[in-house]
Image (cartoon, rainbow, N blue to C red):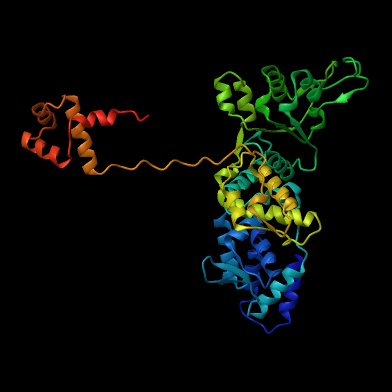
Amino acid sequence: MDELTFAARRAIASLPKSDNAPDLEARFRNLVQSPLRAGLLRFLSARPEEMFDVEMLMSTFGRLKLDVENCVNELVGFGVVQRVAGTPLRFGAVRPVDENSALLLDTFLERRAAISTEDSAPSVQRFREMIGRDEKMLIVFEWIRTAAKSDIAVLILGPTGSGKEVVARMIHELSRRGTEKFQAVNCAALPDTLFESEIFGFEKGAFTGAHDRKPGRLELADHGTLFLDEIGDLSLVAQAKLLRVLEDRRFERLGGQKSLHVDFRLISATNRPLDQFVRDARFREDLYYRVNAFSIRLPSLRERPVDIPVLANRFLARYCAGNGLPLDAKTISTEAMSRLQSYPWPGNIRELESTVSRAALSAPGRVIRDNDIEFLHAGVTMPVPDDPPKLPTLRDAERAHIVRVLDAVSWNKKEAARVLEISRGTLYRKIVEYTLEPETRTSRNRTPE
């Protein structure tokens, strides 16, 4: 019998008997069995004076809108959460009127909450800071949870600065290998001359300067995770060597003769179009299928502009906390926020965080103004879409067509009437109505100096 059930039954036993007490206890136990419902109940109960809408709860718990709505509505149905009408709907904690329900709630809240692996993972907390109001990142969160359940090879796709390594660390920390080592290798900074010694390691005396044996990243990642960042930058020679290890799970150190067996989980990342590289014979097709068993695409910040104010304020609060200031010591003006939202962010979240921190440092007062913001990519400007061409009216279109036909037949009105399939009298009337003259062609084709 668990602690909640024992304490609740003992408390309920001291109350006047009620026919539905056992049923109430079972209902409450089923209610808090869900980690999300239990987390929502604890979160709202710890803030009894505050109200939260669904989007705020989605961002806090990293869950999709439908999941949060279903769970919070079940809490409302039990009577431990109240719904406040408005746009949007807001939710807050409420103490049940029924004494039995209130005792069950008190017993649940007094019990120490079990900290899940997801809640304790540092990378998960970092990823939640990247989540705003747009559900694209919440869908990515669900993909991450799915990928962490097995050892399948994962390919993370996304532009520079979108958080690919954070996602890789999340998958590792949430997987069964989370207690083992996570080895990250930047393939873009690894030339062919160093690839073999860095990945496979080397024996003493393997080459000039090899004074001691050095284990490679594969050996260090044994029972853990190997993360290959920017895998699209590997040369064809390096790709062939990597493919052999993925197929055999065996390798030899540089200068060694003993074959070593490794058990590791592979996660790769790239901002390059690997499928196009395969078609151009710049990336091995067999290796592509090995590393791309399960793909996760991270959206760019440009694809979710609604998140920019949320993330900017979050990064600003982190800057203030990191520098020993109150969380509201700095604020962003409306003009400055508009400028942040109109920028294309080629460096994505990483650039936004750096820009906000730099603006907070350089702003002389409490308010960050428009001129305090300096972008990392100063030469990048937001493309301004051209105004759509004005569509001609029916009168303008008819006039232009008549002029075009008259010009084509050298103002032979009989021929023009035949082409236009109208009478010659109608044509004369149109010429007078539109004040057309043979010189129209000359004036239309004249090039202004």
Could you say which quadrant of the image residue 390 lies in? top left
Give the answer, above or below, for where 307 lies relative to 412.
Answer: below
Give the answer, above or below, for where 10 lies relative to 88.
Answer: below
The residue closer to the viewer here, 443 or 322, is: 443
Position of the N terminus by quadrant: bottom right
Q: Residue furthest front?
A: 449
The residue closer to the viewer here, 51 or 25, is: 51
Q: Residue at x 8, y 38 (%)?
A: 426
The location of residue 22, given as percent across then percent down, is 65, 73
378 left or right of 383 in image: right
Could you say which quadrant of the image residue 167 lies in? top right
Give the answer, above or below, for where 245 lies relative to 24.
Answer: above
Could you say which quadrant of the image residue 194 lies in? top right
327 left or right of 411 in image: right
Q: Number of callouts in the render?
A: 0
Residue 117 visible, this angle: no
The location of residue 400, given as percent across then percent down, is 23, 35
The residue closer to the viewer here, 335 or 123, is: 335
Position of the C terminus by quadrant: top left
398 left or right of 213 in image: left
Residue 349 visible, this angle: yes
Give the answer, above or below, for where 108 lies relative to 115.
Answer: below
The location of residue 134, given as percent across then percent down, is 56, 51
The residue closer to the viewer here, 439 or 177, is: 439
Q: Residue furthest right?
A: 211
The location of residue 314, given as percent across then percent down, is 68, 55
